[in-house]
């Protein structure tokens, strides 16, 4: 049960604290007062889409906190426990925070949780039937999903959709294989010729880049060798630097005895120079050997590069990718040989997948037909108290041709109605009047709500298109439903509001006295104020004594029903 709702800085609400009880609670107010904002805020706390437009103008952040009273065995508590969230005795707090950048954070019992978990928790606690549910119920495309939801078949329907996708994937693989084989057979001569040509060449992926780098290395070594040769030539000029140094040293040695120690430094320098020169010559000789290359190897590289690039042009490929191209041609040639075995394998898989889908679909169809009978009977039971006791409601489950099978199954589901005896059954959108359609919607919603697990049900303006005695009948039915579940109802109908156990009025008012800025306020109405609000709903802007008397009569009818 929803026990409390705390809203801060959401749309026109600056601060709002609401407390709820069991039974039927109605929210009333003039159009534009902000009734939908309350539901939008609650939806946000239950994991609805976060939109920066929900943030009150000028606020940097907003939040909604919903407090629920739950029994120990409630599924929502089991979800919390599975996620490692601490449990609070008898209650569950869901909170959503929204910031000005449009992002939101989710919390359960004060702990951060994923948006997915918040949605799962919300689905276990509250079921909201909005104003646009009728559009879904009018659309035959949605009828199958509604039936599956009522029959508890959603998981099986999801599994069936998976079977369908697997079948279609197998069919696509078979078709692709057959297309490839046909293409290969058309190009068989070309494929064989190309594979043979590339087999002679035997290219490797990346070979061109490798050879080009090797050739560039040869070119660099040639330049280096040329520079070394020039250096050696300089050393050898005039008989060679080493020879000249040796001659100079011998001349000094001849006069060493007579010249004494004065020539020794020069002799030592010449000896060092002669040694360094000899080492330089040896190093240059070694470099010459290192930089030498095999011209035959260079010629082979040039020939290989020419062949690779010619093949690349021939097959409109990159030279470095010729290895992969060769493999693909060989695979296609081999595929021509192995295609029959592969096709048989793919055919077997497609048949197996189709059989799995068809068997699962047949089983689900039987369950849908049983659920359709139960749903139709339940809706018919709801029509009588809504003053449609002569109307009929059927759910048509029609097998489809295989060409029309889809992820949803092998049958079409349609909701059909008859509002007057003797007239043919037909779609709800074409048979029922506006008021009749609204009551059919309510009957469906009540049945679907009773079948769900949520203990709090919210109806947003289910009274559209009805009034007078019909509205009173709708109110009476909702009041009876509220004995087994907590109901929150946004309504414009005084007949329905009079049936409520708790009445809240929503209105716009200045945020502060004298300020032009309006915010949404909500007030819980007691007996006298409630009569005035229902009288306003009856008469409009000017509340008359006749309207007050009529309001009192409506409230009195509710009291009489309760005492009876």
Image (tube, rainbow, N blue to C red):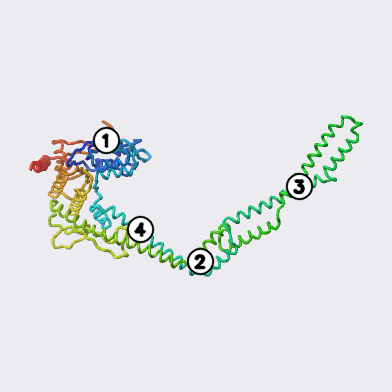
User: Which residue is label 1 attached to?
Assistant: 88
Above or below 279: residue 428:
below
**Residue at position x 88%, y 38% in the image:** 250
Q: In the image, which is nearer the foreground, mark 4 or mark 2? A: 2
Question: For this view, does 236 lie left or right of residue 379?
Answer: right
Badge number at residue 285: 3
Which label sits on residue 165? Answer: 4
Residue 525 in percent (x, y) is at 17, 36
CA separation, marks 1 and 4? 43 Å
Query: Where on the picture, by quarter, is residue 176?
Result: bottom left
Q: Nearer the viewer, residue 222 or 508?
A: 222
Left or right placement of residue 390 versus residue 50 in this view: left
| SS assignment at label 1 | loop
Q: Residues within 10 Å of mark 2 (few under 14, many from 20)?
A: many
Mark identifier at residue 269: none
* Foreground pick, 193 / 16: 193
């Amino acid at each position: 049960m929803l026990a409390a709702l705390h809203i801060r800085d959401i749309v026109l609400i600056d601060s709002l604290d609401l407390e709820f009880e069991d039974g039927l609670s109605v929210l009333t107010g003039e159009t534009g007062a902000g009734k939908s904002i309350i539901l939008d805020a609650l939806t946000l706390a239950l994991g609805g889409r976060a939109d920066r437009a929900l943030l009150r103008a000028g606020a940097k952040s907003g939040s909604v906190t919903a407090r629920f009273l739950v029994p120990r065995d409630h599924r929502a508590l089991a979800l919390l426990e599975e996620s490692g969230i601490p449990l609070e005795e008898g209650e569950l707090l869901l909170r959503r925070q929204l910031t000005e950048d449009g992002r939101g954070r989710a919390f359960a019992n004060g702990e951060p949780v994923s948006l997915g978990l918040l949605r799962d928790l919300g689905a276990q606690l509250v079921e909201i039937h909005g104003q646009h549910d009728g559009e879904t119920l009018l659309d035959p495309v949605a009828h199958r999903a509604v039936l599956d939801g009522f029959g508890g078949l959603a998981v099986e329907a999801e599994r069936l959709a998976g079977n369908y996708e697997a079948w279609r994937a197998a069919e696509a693989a078979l078709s692709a294989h057959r297309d490839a084989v046909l293409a290969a057979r058309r190009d068989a001569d070309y494929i064989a010729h190309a594979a043979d040509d590339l087999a002679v060449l035997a290219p490797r992926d990346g070979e061109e880049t490798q050879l080009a780098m090797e050739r560039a290395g040869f070119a660099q070594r040639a330049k280096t060798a040329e520079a070394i040769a020039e250096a050696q030539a300089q050393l050898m000029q005039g008989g060679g630097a080493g020879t000249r140094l040796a001659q100079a040293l011998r001349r000094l040695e001849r006069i060493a005895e007579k010249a004494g120690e004065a020539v020794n430094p020069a002799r030592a320098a010449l000896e060092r120079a002669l040694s360094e020169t000899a080492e330089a010559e040896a190093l240059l000789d070694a470099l010459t050997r290192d930089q030498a290359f095999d011209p035959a190897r260079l010629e082979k590289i040039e020939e290989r590069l020419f062949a690779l690039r010619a093949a690349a042009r021939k097959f409109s490929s990159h030279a470095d990718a010729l290895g992969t191209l060769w493999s693909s041609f060989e695979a296609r040639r081999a595929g021509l040989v192995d295609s029959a075995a592969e096709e048989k394998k793919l055919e077997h898989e497609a048949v197996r997948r189709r059989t799995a889908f068809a068997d699962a679909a047949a089983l689900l169809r039987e369950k849908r037909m049983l659920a359709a009978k139960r749903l139709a009977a339940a809706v018919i039971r709801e029509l009588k108290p809504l003053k449609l006791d002569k109307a009929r409601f059927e759910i048509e489950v029609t097998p489809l041709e295989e060409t029309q099978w889809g992820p949803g199954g092998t049958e079409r589901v349609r909701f059909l109605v008859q509002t007057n005896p003797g007239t043919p059954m037909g779609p709800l959108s074409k048979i029922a009047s506006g008021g009749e359609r609204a009551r059919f919607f309510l009957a469906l919603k009540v049945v679907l709500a009773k079948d769900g697990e949520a203990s709090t049900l919210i109806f947003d303006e289910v009274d559209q298109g009805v009034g007078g005695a019909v509205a009173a009948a709708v109110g009476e039915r909702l009041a009876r439903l509220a004995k087994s579940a907590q109901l929150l109802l946004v309504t414009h109908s005084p007949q329905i509001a009079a049936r409520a156990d708790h009445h809240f009025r929503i209105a716009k008012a200045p945020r502060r006295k004298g300020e032009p800025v309006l915010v949404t306020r909500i007030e819980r109405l007691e007996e006298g104020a409630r009569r005035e609000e229902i009288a306003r709903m009856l008469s409009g802007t000017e509340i008359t004594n006749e309207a007050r008397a009529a309001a009192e009569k409506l409230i009195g009818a509710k009291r009489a029903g309760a005492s009876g």
